[in-house]
Image: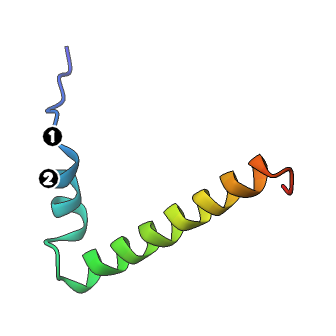
Amino acid sequence: MNRTKIVDFEDHLKHEYGERGTEKREKFEEGFEAFKIGALIYDLRKNQGLT
């Protein structure tokens, strides 16, 4: 049976993108913030019947 180790999300981010403050991690964080804002705008527009 193949068992995978479960890691928390912060550890996953550190492994994939490095510690906070590194260029790769900050680029990821900026992209994630842009995604969250886009999702919020989409939901607001959908609730108003605009999308």
Q: With 40 as the anchor, is 50 left or right in this view?
A: right
**Rendered location of residue 40, percent (x, y):** 59, 58
Is the Cβ of the residue at disc 1 closer than 8 Å to that at disc 2? yes
SS at mark 2 in the image:
helix
Residue at the limit of the structure toward the top, as seen here: 1
Camera-side residue: 44 or 31?
44
**Which residue occupies 14% across, 53% down?**
11
Residue at the limit of the structure toward the bottom, as seen here: 23
Q: For the residue marked with disc 1, what is the amino acid?
A: Val
Q: Is residue 13 above or below residue 18?
A: above
**Rendered location of residue 36, percent (x, y):** 50, 62
Q: Is residue 6 above or below residue 39?
A: above
Q: Which mark is residue 7?
A: 1
Camera-side residue: 13 or 46?
46
**Rendered location of residue 21, percent (x, y):** 17, 82
Q: For the residue marked with disc 2, what is the amino acid?
A: Asp
Residue at the limit of the structure toward the front, as seen here: 48
Picture quadrant of residue 31: bottom left
Coloring basis for residues: rainbow
Q: Which mark is residue 11?
A: 2
Position of the C terminus by quadrant: bottom right
**Which residue occupies 54% across, 66% down?**
37
Q: Is residue 15 above or below residue 17?
A: above
Number of other residues with Cα within 10 Å of mark 2, as a class: few under 14, some 14 to 19, many 20 or more:
few
Q: Is residue 18 above or below residue 23?
A: above
SS at mark 1 in the image:
loop
